């Protein structure tokens, strides 16, 4: 298995792990706050979905050989600016908090699948080569794929740990790491 296939397989497995977990939870469990946080599992999925939009923009830009066209977020805040993450995350929470679970889940899943499909179309040298994309200085495009995997995995592990701690975790299998 080449590196591209390895990365894509790990991403697909991460999607499957999330889907397995989500399928075992009731809507009430998905919507309930993960105390002491105000965030619910739905809010976590909305969060990773929103950040995934930026990853999608980068992968699509690579495929089309153009600059990324990022989603418009909180006015006046650059998500790539140091220290902006907390402010962006609060804005994302406020933005998606009122959306129904079905809509958030569908958008997250569709975005994740689009990410995988687009990345699959990129040649491995273009995915792994450093300096290929001027808007990604010093990093290969694979960095974006691995970062997306890491972000999903981080939130998956935190969610599972919370569910285990509170005795509400149905049977869920483990996963691989990159």
Image (cartoon, grey):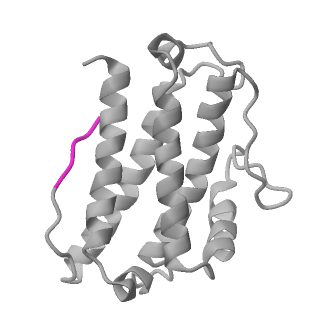
Q: Is residue 54 positioned above or below 75 on the image?
A: above
Q: Give the residue at x 72% y 45%.
A: 81
State the residue at coordinates (26%, 68%): 161
> Relative to residue 126, is residue 145 depicted above or below?
below
Q: Is residue 143 left or right of residue 161?
A: right
Side of 80 relative to 111 (left or right): right
Q: Residue shown at 62%/64% (left/top)?
A: 89
Q: Position of residue 126 (x, y in %)?
A: 54, 14
Vertical placement of residue 145 versus 30, above or below: above
Q: Is residue 144 visible?
A: no
Q: Is residue 54 magenta?
A: no
Name which quarter of the figure residue 7 lies in.
Answer: top left
Q: Which residue is at the front of the view, 46 or 86?
A: 46
Q: Nearer the viewer, residue 16 or 76?
A: 16
**Where are the magenta residues, as a range?**
174-178
Q: Quadrant of residue 171?
A: bottom left
Task: Examine the rendering and report whether any part of residue 134 can be seen.
Answer: yes
Q: Which percent across, then down, holds residue 8?
A: 37, 33
Give x and y (percent) for residue 156.
34, 60
**Residue situated in front as seen by the camera: 158 or 9:** 9
- Residue 177 painted magenta: yes
Q: Quadrant of the N terminus?
A: top left
Q: Quadrant of the C terminus?
A: top left
Locate residue 164, reporting x and y percent: 20, 75
Report how many numbered discs are placed on residues in the image: 0
Residue at the far right in the pictured view: 76
Magenta highlight: main SS: loop
Q: Residue at x 78, y 54 (%)?
A: 72
């Amino acid at each position: 298995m080449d590196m591209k296939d390895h990365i894509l397989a790990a991403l697909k497995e991460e999607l499957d792990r999330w889907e397995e977990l989500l399928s075992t939870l009731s809507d009430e469990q998905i919507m309930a706050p993960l105390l002491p946080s105000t965030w619910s599992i739905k809010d976590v999925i909305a969060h990773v979905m929103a950040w995934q939009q930026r990853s999608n923009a980068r992968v699509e830009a690579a495929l089309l050989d153009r600059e990324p066209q990022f989603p418009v977020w909180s006015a006046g805040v650059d998500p790539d600016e140091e220290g902006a993450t907390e402010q962006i995350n609060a804005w994302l929470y406020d933005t998606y908090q009122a959306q129904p679970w079905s809509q958030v889940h569908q958008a997250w899943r569709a975005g994740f699948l689009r990410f995988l499909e687009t990345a699959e179309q990129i040649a491995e040298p273009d995915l792994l080569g450093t300096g290929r994309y001027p808007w990604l200085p010093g990093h290969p495009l694979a960095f974006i794929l691995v970062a997306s995997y890491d972000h999903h995995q981080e939130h998956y592990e935190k969610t599972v740990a919370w569910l285990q701690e509170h005795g509400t975790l149905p049977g869920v299998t483990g996963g691989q790491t990159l």
